[in-house]
Image (cartoon, rainbow, N blue to C red):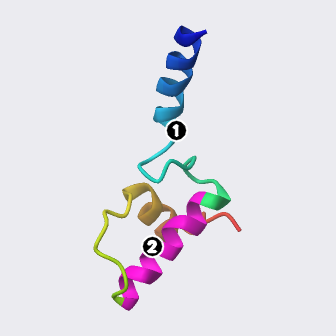
Amino acid sequence: MSRLRTRLEKLEARFVDHSRLIQHSPAWFDYWGEKLDQLDRGEDDPELIPLEYVDALLSGIEEQ
C-alpha cells in the first residue's frame, strides 16, 4: 500500500504547483487570482506567480 501511495504522490506532483491545487482548475484560478490581487494591494509578500497562470490570463482561457 505504501508503494501505491508513493506512486500516487509522484503522479499528483506532476499536476499541481506549490499551491497544492490542480493547475487550470477553478480553485487554482481563484487561489492565484487572489494572490495577484493581494500583491497588487501590497498586502502580501511577493510570491512567484506561475507562468501557467500568466499565460492563461493572457490567452483568455481562465475557467469561470
In this view, the residue in front, 50 or 43, is 43
Label 1: which secondary element: helix
Residue at 52%, 75% in the rendered image: 34
Q: Is residue 64 above or below residue 12?
A: below
Question: On the image, numbered disc 1 is attached to which residue?
Answer: 15
Picture residue at 60% right of the left edge, 63% below the top: 61
Residue occupying the point 31% across, 66% down: 47
For residue 4, what is the image quadrant?
top right
Crowding at dot 1, Cα within 10 Å, few <14 / some 14-19 / many 20+, comes out as few
Q: Quadrant of residue 45?
A: bottom left
**In this image, 43 relative to 4: left or right?**
left
Magenta stretch: includes residue 17: no
Mark 2, residues whose alpha carbon is within 10 Å: few (<14), some, or many (≥20)?
A: some
Q: Which mark is residue 54?
A: none
Instruction: Point out the image quarter for the C terminus.
Output: bottom right
Q: Amino acid at mark 1?
A: Phe
> What is the number of the mark on residue 35?
2
- What span is colored magenta in the figure? 28-41
Most extreme residue toward the front is 2
Percent x, y of residue 51: 37, 58
Circle 2 SS class: helix
